[in-house]
Amino acid sequence: MLERRTQKTKPPQMYQVVMLNDDYTPMEFVVVVLQEFFNKDREAATQIMLKIHLDGKGICGVYTRDVAATKVDQVLDAAHQAGHPLQCVSEPVE
């Protein structure tokens, strides 16, 4: 007879999307990217942009792995098309 075990499914590993500061990307561009890809209002986007500017990096949002990877790609694409060196990475949330 097989023993029935209740399996606890743990929630998926979450990833935070982190934008890194550089000396070339205009602050306004960062604000627009945050509004467009992370659904931030202007106030929230400005706060995150200032954090990136002052601390060297800032968290844009927390998502499942695939969504985080897509957001990173969208940001890098937009930055590349606009000719900015903006960098964005996703990392597991500890």
Image (spheres, helix red, strand yellow):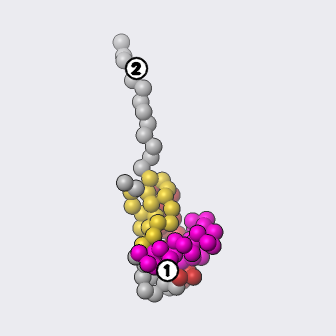
Residue under the image location 52 percent in, 71 percent down: 48
Furthest-right residue in view?
41
Label 1 sits on a secondary structure element that is helix
Residue ranking furthest to the bottom: 24
Mark 2 element type: loop
Residue 40, image quadrant: bottom right
Residue 60 is covered by the magenta coloring = no
Instruction: Reply yes or no: does residue 48 show up in magenta.
Output: yes
State whether residue 27 is above or below residue 7: below
**Front-most of 3 and 34?**
34
Residue ranking furthest to the top? 1
Return the disc, 1 or 2, that comes first in the chain's sequence: 2
Magenta stretch, residue numbers: 30-55
Residue at 61%, 72% in the rendered image: 43
> Residue 87 at what x, y percent from top left?
43, 75
Residue under pointer 1: 80
- The picture places residue 89, in percent across and down from the top left corner, at 42, 67
Q: Mark 1 to mark 2: distance in Å?
A: 53 Å
Viewer-proximal residue, 38 or 59?
59
The amino acid at mark 2 is Arg
Residue tagged by mark 2? 4
Which amino acid type is shown beneath numbered disc 1? His
Question: Crowding at label 2, few (<14), some or many (≥20) Cα neighbours within 10 Å?
Answer: few
Residue beneath the point at 37% across and 54% down? 94
Nearer to the camera, 29 or 74: 29
Vertical order, 1 against 83 (above or below) = above
Q: Is residue 94 above or below residue 11?
A: below
User: Residue 58, position in %: x, y?
Assistant: 45, 70
Bin the neighbour count of mark 1 within 10 Å (Cα to Cα): few under 14, some 14-19, many 20 and up: few
